[in-house]
Image (cartoon, rainbow, N blue to C red):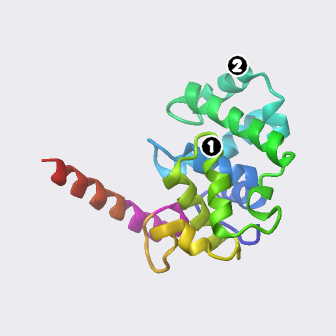
Amino acid sequence: MTSQLSLVGDPEADRILSDHPFALLTGMLLDQQIPMEVAFDGPRKIVERLGSIDPDTIAGTDPQQFIALCATPPAVHRFPQSMGQRVHDLAAKVVEDYDGDASAIWTAGDPDGKEILKRLKALPGYGDQKARIFLALLGKQCGLTAAGWEKAAGDYGRSGVHMSIADVTSPESLQQVRAYKKEKKAAAKAAKA
């Protein structure tokens, strides 16, 4: 990856995300039902406790031991059991399908945006929306130049928006994304009423 990310606002956490593709993939996996910056700080906690964010190391760790590591306060996620298992499953999938190289998901065979989206959606814990947001993050902040990534990322690939973690580059942009999400939730709630 090419640029220094600023997703957490903690220099060490952001360095780990910038330097380790699997850390970024893991942060995105954890980004549900907790604040974005807490999710993307998860890989730093794993490194502190396991000594590595390498998929081979995680996949080679006993799943129950890894889940216990994720549950140690402060927990990696508010649901450490299920999310710890998902991170372990994600590591195993990256080892099995990409020889432990997470970046191969978006680089192996020079894939276009549509193919990268398909590969992301095949990962444990990655549905359509999460895969599109991650693809947008790669394109907007990590130097991905795959043909058609913007189209494959959908609305998240548009420039000049503050819709997701793909658009977070500073504390100010984080607040803009938060405001957008709050607005969307309010609109969805109003539509149900």
Total numbered labels placed on residues in the image: 2
Residue sitting at x 50%, y 79%: 159
| Residue for badge 1 | 42
Inspect the image, locate mark 1, and give the three-letter code of the amino acid beneath it.
Gly
Task: Say if the magenta span includes residue 47.
Answer: no
Q: Nearer the viewer, residue 122 or 60?
A: 122
Task: Say if the magenta span includes residue 173.
Answer: yes
Residue placed farthest to the top in the image? 64
Question: Is the magenta region chiefly helix, strand or loop?
Answer: helix
Dot 1 and dot 2 residues touching (CB under 8 Å): no
Camera-side mark, 1 or 2? 2
Q: Is residue 177 left or right of residue 79?
A: left
Which residue range is magenta in the image?
164-178
Residue sitting at x 47%, y 62%: 164
Residue placed farthest to the left in the image? 193
Q: Quadrant of the N terminus?
A: bottom right
| Residue for badge 2 | 64
Q: Nearer the viewer, residue 143 or 37?
A: 143
